[in-house]
Image (cartoon, rainbow, N blue to C red):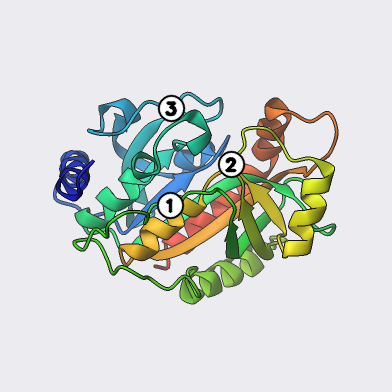
Amino acid sequence: MTDDARMTAVNAASGRLAELTGDVVPSALVVLGSGLSGVVDAMEVSGELPFGELPGFAASAVAGHTGTFVFGHMGATPVLVMMGRLHLYEGHPVDQVVLPVRAAAVLGCKVLIVTNAAGGITADLHVGQTMLIADHINLLGVNPLTGSNLDALGTRFPPMAGAYSARINMLAVAAAEELGMDLAEGVYAAVPGPNYETAAEVRALRTLGADAVGMSTVPEVIAGVHAGMEVAGFSLIANVAADVGHGHADVLAAVGSGTPLLTSLLAAILGRL
């Protein structure tokens, strides 16, 4: 796809999102990972759009991902929420995976908050706990900035040191303290999936400095930083990485137990942006 075609796709998607949000520019785009759609229950919803109706995007096919854009308010803050995401392991190209992030940036959205269900690597993380993402390791083998630069979105060589907003992270820590929430902080490693990791791979990830591992999030973060968005990320620990016998159904069940606290945390953060 040519650069003009890539930007045309972004602009078309942004235009369709603008029809959903009307005259209001969302303050934040929130991407909800596996099983986390309950966050929307805390919103005053104004409108919805299935993934498949966004030009250039595709319907979600992963259990736990509703596959809908939801626009509304979390308190007084206008928010655009993705109930799920597309994944590289589904066979989607990386430009398509990050299309909504770029479209939201063109729309005027300044903040990106990404969430995911992840496997805990560090011993002191427990199932159901939320980890504030302080940094990431990209082991996906792809990058949304590969190819010629989309100058309309951002610079050719965006720095990724400090990719996660110190301001929003401080808001998260303060909100967690008020909620009495056991909020961890650590490094998220993104791997291709869709299989879960071997025990040897988990040992290698631990050696690299990863605290949690998952199969998403990093392309969206890179695209958001490139487009000048302020980014924050949260992993809900859904299993112990390399634990024998767990599957996606177990992950969704574990996420369900941690969603209420994460919902409260996101609501508090969004109310303070």
SS class, disc 2 = loop
* Kind of residue indicated by mark 2: Pro
Q: Nearer the viewer, mark 1 or mark 2?
A: 2
Tags 3 and 1 touching, CB below 8 Å = no
Q: Position of residue 173 (x, y in %)?
A: 60, 70
Circle 1 crowding by C-alpha within 10 Å: few under 14, some 14–19, many from 20: many
Question: What x and y, as percent, mark residue 92?
Answer: 41, 33
Residue bearing mark 1: 220
Q: Gap between marks 3 and 1, in whole Å? A: 16 Å
Pointer 3: residues within 10 angstroms few (<14), some, or many (20+)? Answer: many
Q: Is residue 226 above or below residue 130?
A: below
Residue denoted by label 3: 60
Residue identifier under label 2: 192
| Residues at circles 2 and 3 in contact by the CB criterion of under 8 Å | no
* Residue 111 locus on image (x, y percent): 36, 62
Spatial separation of the CA atoms under disc 2 and disc 3: 17 Å
Q: In this rendered view, identify the residue nearer to me: 74 or 243.
A: 243
> Which of the two residues, 187 or 170, is positioned nearer the viewer here?
187
C-alpha gap between disc 1 and disc 2: 14 Å
Relative image position of residue 104 (x, y in whole percent): 28, 51
Quarter containing the N terminus: top left
Q: Tell me the quadrant of the picture where the C terminus can be found.
A: bottom left
Q: Quadrant of residue 85?
A: top left
- Comparing 91 with 258, the one in front is 91
- Which numbered mark, 2 or 3, is in the foreground of this view? 2
